[in-house]
Image (cartoon, rainbow, N blue to C red):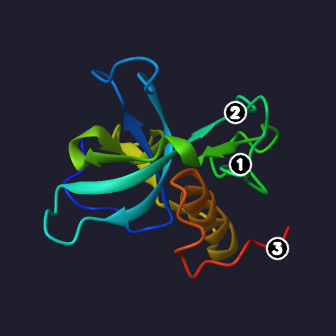
Amino acid sequence: MALRFQPKPRSVVFCNFAGFIEPEIIKRRPVVVLAVHKRNSRLVTVVPLSTTAPDPVEAHHYRLKQNPLPGAADKVVWAKCDMVAVVSIERLDLVHTGRGPDGKRRYLSLQIGPEQFDAIRHGVASALGLLSLAALKPPTA
């Protein structure tokens, strides 16, 4: 079910990239909300997450310290900061954990920590060639 609100920056939600064209992302995958659009309440900027390690690993890839998705703590997850996208909130869905006793879906509000968020922002700045312009400092590992 599509969201009717802009999730806050640092939120982890699912995004359906169907309709994009390869080599763009074309399937449903988890994303980190990077920013909300200030003038259009139906748009957000996201960075996709992937369990496929980049080859080679570059400055615009960030390995999260832990997988934010429930039940997937053993899987390594990467932020693909070179694949940043502005998408409609209608493509987004909260992480759901199944159904409750009443038959209704149960959802989680997930967020990554500020240190990891700063590292992803740094990766995006690197991917866009903006490090020399940004006041971002490299993340501490």
The crowd level at tag 3 (other Cα within 10 Å; few <14, some 14-19, many 20+) is few
Q: Is residue 107 above or below residue 99?
A: below
Residue 49 position by quadrant: top right
Amino acid carrying label 1: it is: Asn
Circle nearer the N terminus (1, 2): 2
Q: Is residue 54 above or below residue 117?
A: above
Circle nearer the N terminus (2, 3): 2
Residue occupying the far front of the picture = 132
* Residue at (63, 57) in percent of width and height: 123
Give the side of residue 82 with respect to residue 94, left or right. Answer: right
Circle nearer the N terminus (1, 3): 1
* Residue at (21, 72) in percent of width and height: 38
Residue 53 position by quadrant: top right
The CA span between labels 2 and 3 is: 22 Å
Q: Secondary structure at mark 3?
A: loop
On the image, numbered disc 3 is attached to which residue?
Answer: 140
On the image, numbered disc 2 is attached to which residue?
Answer: 51
The mark closer to the camera, 1 or 2, is 2
Q: Secondary structure at mark 2?
A: loop
The crowd level at tag 1 (other Cα within 10 Å; few <14, some 14-19, many 20+) is some
The mark closer to the camera, 2 or 3, is 3
The CA span between labels 1 and 3 is: 19 Å
Q: Secondary structure at mark 1?
A: loop
* Residue at (71, 42) in percent of width and height: 77
The CA span between labels 1 and 2 is: 9 Å
Residue occupying the far top of the picture = 22
Question: Which residue occupies the foreground of this view, 133 or 99?
Answer: 133
On the image, numbered disc 1 is attached to which residue?
Answer: 67
